[in-house]
Image (cartoon, rainbow, N blue to C red):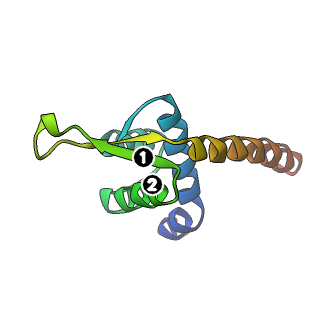
Amino acid sequence: MDLKLINREILLSFWKVHILYHAADGEVIGQWMIKELRHHGYEVSPGTLYPLLKRMEKNGWLVSTVDAARGPKAPRAYRITKDGREVLKIVRQQLKELGVEVGKHG
């Protein structure tokens, strides 16, 4: 089984849901998010995560800031936006429906 293909085609969406979920609780830092996703068994690299975060920001689901007082290497912190909360709400509803559907045929 090609795990890279599965990651690219299916699990990438799960990562986005995790990011939105954690960003709804507070700021998300990329390196922390990589560790969190790995904790859940996802193999994600910085080369995949950071473009994903930028895309989510471009979509209006996240907004980022950098604390300049922490110096030039300060991490970028991502927070969920109003639109991001709406996306998370929709995803939660869809996950409930999917869980019921998949559970019937499990």
Q: Residue at x 85, y 43 (%)?
A: 100
Q: Residue at x 18, y 42 (%)?
A: 74
Residue position marked by numbered label 1 in the rendering = 63
Indicate the position of residue 101 as horizontal and vertical percent values: 86, 49
Indicate the position of residue 27 as horizontal and vertical percent values: 39, 34
Does residue 33 lie above or below 48 as drawn? Answer: above
At label 2, the amino acid type is: Glu
At label 1, the amino acid type is: Val
Q: In terms of secondary structure, where does tag 1 sit?
A: strand
Residue position marked by numbered label 2 in the rendering = 57
Count of picture labels: 2
Q: Residue furthest right?
A: 104
Indicate the position of residue 67 as horizontal and vertical percent values: 22, 37
Residue 74 seen anywhere in this rendered image of the structure: yes
Q: Mark 2: give few (<14), some (14-19) or many (20+) Cα within 10 Å.
A: some
Residue 34 seen anywhere in this rendered image of the structure: no
Q: Using residue 89 as the reference point, say whether residue 60 is left or right of it.
A: left
Circles 1 and 2: CB distance less than 8 Å? yes
> In the rendered view of the protein, which quadrant contains the N terminus?
bottom right
Q: Using residue 94 as the reference point, say whether residue 62 is left or right of it.
A: left
Q: Using residue 13 as the reference point, say whether residue 77 is left or right of it.
A: left
